[in-house]
Amino acid sequence: MTKFGACSRQPGDDDWSAGDRRAEGSSDAYTLAKEAMFVHCDTSDAPWTVIKSDCKKRARLNAMRYLLHRVPYSKRNLERIGPVDPLIVGRPSLVPGRGEDLLAANGNG
């Protein structure tokens, strides 16, 4: 769901910036441009890591877990850190995109 689809307020409300109002009709174009960028720029030499943020709390926890798994440091306890959720964090081709939100389909989102 896009920012605009999730909002309970209308575009004229005070919490919508001028940029939000201009971008409201362009979210599909932005999504297509983002996906095209991933197709052309996500390489094994310079990989992208995508963190889905439909649920901010889960996104933040998994972003921290991802970093803690990747950065070597003393006394690292992977069991205590917990696993990274592959439905939230991964390469653009591995993380579900539009219409493929497995979390919502399973009622876990």
Image (spheres, helix red, strand yellow):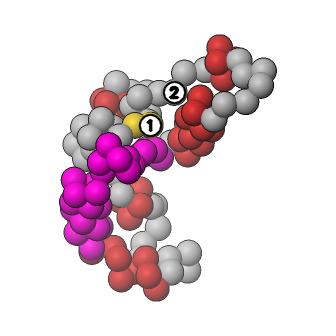
Pinpoint residue 101: horizontal percent, then vertical percent.
Answer: 30, 37
Could you say where residue 100 lies in the image, as x and y percent from the top left? 24, 37
Start-end of magenta stretch: 26-54
The answer to which image quadrant residue 108 occupies is: top left
| Looking at the image, residue 78 lies above or below residue 85 | above
Question: Residue drawn at (57%, 33%), measured in percent from left and top?
Answer: 70
- Amino acid bearing label 2: Val
Mark 1: secondary structure: strand
| Mark 2 residue element | loop
**Which residue is at the far right?**
75
CA neighbours of label 1 inside 10 A, class few (<14), some (14 to 19), many (20+):
many
- Residue 89: image tag: 1
Residue sitting at the far bottom: 18
Residue shown at 56%/75% (left/top)?
15
Quadrant in which the C terminus is drawn: top left
Residue lying at the far top in this picture: please name it: 79
In this view, 38 is above or below 65: below
91 and 43: which is toward the camera: 43
- Residue picked out by circle 2: 84
User: Is 86 contained in the magenta span?
Assistant: no
- Residue contact between numbered discs 2 and 1, judged by CB atoms under 8 Å: yes
Q: Say if residue 58 shows up in the picture.
A: yes
Check if residue 31 falls in the magenta segment.
yes
Instruction: Look at the picture and state if 41 lies above or below 30.
Output: above
Q: Residue at x 39, y 80 (%)?
A: 21
6 relative position to 38: left or right:
right
Let me know if residue 65 appears in the view.
Answer: no
